[in-house]
Amino acid sequence: MKSESLSQARMQSSTPTVLDKYFGHLHETLTKNDLLNKPGQIFNCDESGFSLNPKPRYIATRKGQPHTYSVTSGSKTQITVMACICAAGYSMPPMVIFDRKGLNPDWKEGEVPGTSYGQNESAWIDSDMFDGWFNQLFLKFIPAARPILLLLDGHSSHYNPAVIKQAASNYIIIFCLPPNTTHLMQPLDRVCFGAVKQFWNEECHSYMQQHPGKVITRGQFCQVFRLAWMRGMKMKNILASFKTTGIQPFNKLAIALPGECNTTSDEK
């Protein structure tokens, strides 16, 4: 078995005390707002980067055969994708953030239906972009039932004062996950992003096989990403994301700390 890397900060934050405090606060919030058995009113949002330079595939060769090579773009560019999933088993359309000040309309070709866009030089989300996502996408897709619980990490971009005010006026509870624990407690990190990134790598190689001499650029991103998104954002993966984090159904024993063995979680 290959070990997984874990930063010192994450290790120090992954303690029974942190876990108990978190689940105590989560249970209190769910109970107080009558959300324990209302998965359609529980959401998680987060963002992640997708490289235009996919990892090479493993291939089988005969012993002593010369090196084999895979053509890649060689680009270090990453496109950021903002995702939001619901504990009832569905996802909202993504927001795609390009590392450019302007958006070339051709880059939208083949997009996931309903995709929104952001642009800046870093390709990472900022507070203004999060405000736009919240007002133009999140508020549009959430159900009429209230309150809504939105779980997210503590990234500074998620705390635009305008968003907090808008959330309060729309009966949306913003629930922040403990620092350095999202590898354990954030639904998107536990299942969905891993699945989408695996399929992204596969779809990139499939595209390059079908189009010899071409590599993945910003112009192909949306059409290739759509295939990975549709494969990874399946209902079973979304439901598993909330189950393995103990959010829906509520289960404070669902999370195994580093070094512990947990038999309550489903295999992925």
Image (cartoon, rainbow, N blue to C red):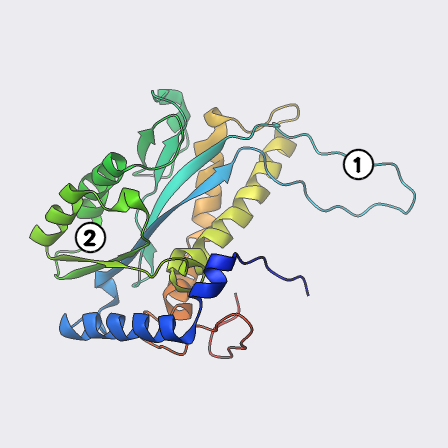
| For marks 2 and 1 on the same chain, the one whose residue lies earlier in the sequence | 1
- Sort mark 1 into few (<14), some (14-19) or many (20+) by Cα contacts within 10 Å: few
| Residue 230: x %, y % from top left | 43, 47
Amino acid carrying label 1: it is: Thr
Instruction: Say if 73 sits above or below 148 in the image.
Output: above
Q: Is residue 205 left or right of residue 122?
A: right
> Considering depth in this image, is 259 or 120 the residue closer to the camera?
259
Query: Which residue reaches farthest left?
Result: 169
Label disc, if present, on residue 68 of the rendered structure: 1
Residue drawn at x 34%, y 21% as measured from the top left: 101
Q: Is residue 42 left or right of residue 221?
A: left
Instruction: Say if 235 sits above or below 69 in the image.
Output: below
**Picture mark count:** 2
| Residue 185: x %, y % from top left | 39, 64
| Residue 39: x %, y % from top left | 26, 66
Residue drawn at x 47%, y 26% as measured from the top left: 218
